[in-house]
Amino acid sequence: MSAVNEAVAQAAERIDEARRSGIPCDPVRDLLPSGDLDAAYAVQSALTDRRLAEGRRVTGWKIGLTSASVQAQLGVDTPDFGALMDDTAVPDGAEIGWGSVLQPKAEAEVALVLEHDLIHERHTVADVIRATAFVLPAIEVVGSRIRDWDITAVDTIADNASSGAYVLGTRPVTLRELDLRTAGMVLERRGEPVSTGVGAACLGNPLHAAVWLADTLVRLGRPLRAGDTVLTGALGPMTAVEPGDVVEARLDGLGSVRAAFGRTGQEGDAR
């Protein structure tokens, strides 16, 4: 085993132990070559393979780092992505057991659900529009297996782009009815606004983020497929949540979606 492969295996085991134990771990950047995003994605892929071996399935993909300010904070100039798994999909308003997502935070997003594959080397916005069956409002519950969210780009990519859980709304809307660039968003916690934003905050338009993901996954040999859900990225700042919180996202033209969190002491498998 090469030194890099051994480092990837060690990083994957560190993060997976945090998932299994529910105890956040040290960052993995000390194990991997400095700034090596390919190695970080190799860790992510190894962890996804472990989940698949456990009987889980990939239901789609999430896009992260779509904000220029967050990219600058982490020292990158590109978004990142992570896999969505079937056991991280939570029905609208259903309770998310406290502790099932480590160090959870919530953010509101636009979700695209595809009806056609995206297999070209380079995609256009028109390709993405044509491939999209419908759009849903979404709350992504981001979570970090890395202690105290002490992350660089290498850490968050290795940790499946800090994916925890996701909640989709239930009223599908077609893209012909929407202008995603100007769509406003309000995220409320316990009825109080805690985050606001607009579609343009996501790489200028959530569809631009989807184009980036489609191109990137084709280069990696695992293109977006019909039936995939794509979380296109946060429309505003993420917000920390506490036990017993209920957060609700309202998106112009898309309606609302809610995420409810259990109270301290409830059990749940860490994600």
Image (tube, rainbow, N blue to C red):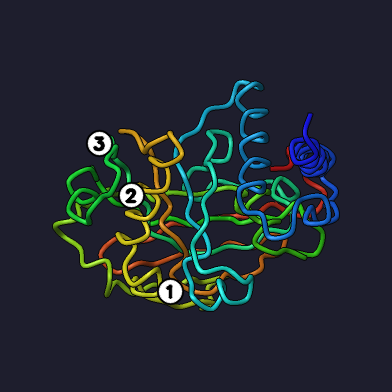
| Residue positioned 58% across, 34% down in the render | 87
Eyeballing the image, is 108 above or below 166? below
Q: Amino acid at mark 1?
A: Val
Bin the neighbour count of mark 1 within 10 Å (Cα to Cα): few under 14, some 14-19, many 20 and up: many
| Callout 3 crowding tier (Cα within 10 Å): few <14, some 14–19, many ≥20 | some
Which is more N-terminal, label 2 or label 1? 2
Asked if labels 2 and 1 touch by Cβ distance under 8 angstroms, the answer is: no
Query: Going by the image, does 72 lie left or right of 184?
Result: right
Q: Position of residue 98 (x, y in %)?
A: 73, 50
Q: Does 43 sit above or below residue 57?
A: below
Q: Residues within 10 Å of mark 2 (few under 14, many from 20)?
A: many
Work out which quarter of the rendered image holds the C terminus and state it: top right
Residue in the image at 40% along x and 69% along y: 202
**Residue mark closest to the camera, 1 vs 2:** 2
- Provide the residue designation for mark 3: 115
* Amino acid type assigned to the residue bearing label 2 in the image: Leu
Percent x, y of residue 67: 48, 72
